[in-house]
Image: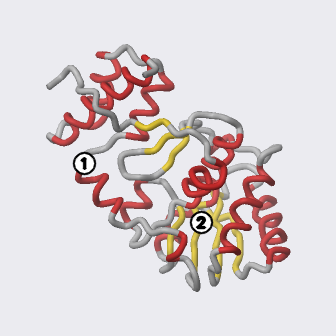
């Protein structure tokens, strides 16, 4: 096994153990990161990928598959889905977290700019939603991010061409509207997932099943050093 991945899995095992016993998250991340001398990128993998087992299980209970989307209203946490998918298309690090959700570690949300892979990502998203027979789509983008209004307008045109009912809007706090939407939520944001009733990991499904991009899997048999 790749020695870096082995070290990362040992660190993940230790972090999981600490969190399961109620130790503070940030202090535990620092302790484990220092113990294994992890660079910033791999510390971010732990931050986004490892959580207390009870938190992971609670989130997993909310996940549905694409077969559960037919005839449903679907709300997309726009930048969350788009950036995760674009990261995979660009060959950047993507991981499967303890809660079953796929996440990137790019951290570019506030600095996001549509680029060469944006249209490919949008076509994959909208094409999949059309195929699965959703009733209505709501895409919400963070208006403080530059050019969100233009992107929302472009998304509305793309949706109309696909024959998808719904809308795309730039709003100050997308999470607030997403959680009040009442349908299926598409996001891998932990805080959104914690408050939603039904969640579909749209970007994750496309990455796993359509792009078949390799994911970092933090679940291994390696025991950590702290137990």
Mark number for residue 92?
Answer: none
Q: Position of residue 3 (x, y in %)?
A: 42, 17
Residue situated in front as seen by the camera: 174 or 32: 32
Around disc 2, counting alpha carbons within 10 Å, would you say few (fewer than 14), some (14 to 19), or many (20 or more)?
Answer: many
Q: Residue at x 50, y 65 (%)?
A: 200
Q: Position of residue 22 (x, y in %)?
A: 16, 41
Q: Position of residue 2 (x, y in %)?
A: 46, 20
Q: Position of residue 56 (x, y in %)?
A: 31, 52
Q: Quadrant of residue 33?
A: top left
Q: Which residue is mark 1?
A: 53
Query: As displayed, is residue 62 above or below residue 14?
Result: below
User: Judging from the image, what secondary structure is the residue with disc 2 in?
Assistant: strand
Q: Quadrant of the N terminus?
A: top left
Instruction: Work out how far the residue at label 2 is from the one at label 1, CA to CA, in angstroms.
Output: 26 Å
User: Judging from the image, what secondary structure is the residue with disc 1 in?
Assistant: helix
Q: Quadrant of residue 87?
A: top right
Q: Is residue 146 left or right of residue 209?
A: right
Q: Is residue 60 left or right of residue 91?
A: left
Mark nearest the camera among 2 and 1 is 1
Mark number for residue 76?
Answer: 2
Q: Residue at x 60, y 47 (%)?
A: 84
């Amino acid at each position: 096994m790749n020695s870096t991945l082995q070290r990362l899995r040992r660190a993940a095992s230790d972090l999981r153990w600490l969190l399961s016993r109620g130790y503070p998250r940030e202090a535990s991340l620092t302790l484990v990161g220092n113990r294994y001398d992890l660079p910033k990128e791999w510390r971010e993998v732990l931050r986004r990928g490892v959580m207390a087992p009870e938190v992971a299980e609670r989130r997993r209970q909310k996940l549905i598959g694409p077969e559960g989307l037919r005839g449903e209203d679907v709300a997309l946490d726009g930048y969350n889905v788009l950036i995760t998918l674009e990261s995979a298309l660009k060959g950047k690090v993507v991981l499967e977290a303890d809660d079953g959700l796929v996440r990137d570690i790019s951290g570019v949300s506030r600095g996001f700019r549509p680029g060469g892979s944006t249209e490919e990502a949008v076509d994959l998203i909208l094409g999949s939603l059309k195929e699965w027979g959703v009733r209505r789509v709501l895409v919400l983008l963070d208006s403080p991010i530059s050019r969100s209004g233009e992107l929302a307008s472009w998304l509305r045109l793309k949706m109309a061409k696909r024959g998808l009912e719904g809308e795309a809007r730039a709003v100050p706090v997308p999470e607030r509207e997403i959680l009040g939407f009442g349908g299926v939520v598409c996001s891998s944001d932990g805080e959104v997932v914690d408050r939603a009733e039904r969640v579909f990991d749209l970007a994750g499904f496309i990455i796993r099943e359509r792009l078949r991009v390799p994911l970092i899997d933090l679940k291994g048999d390696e025991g950590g050093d702290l137990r």
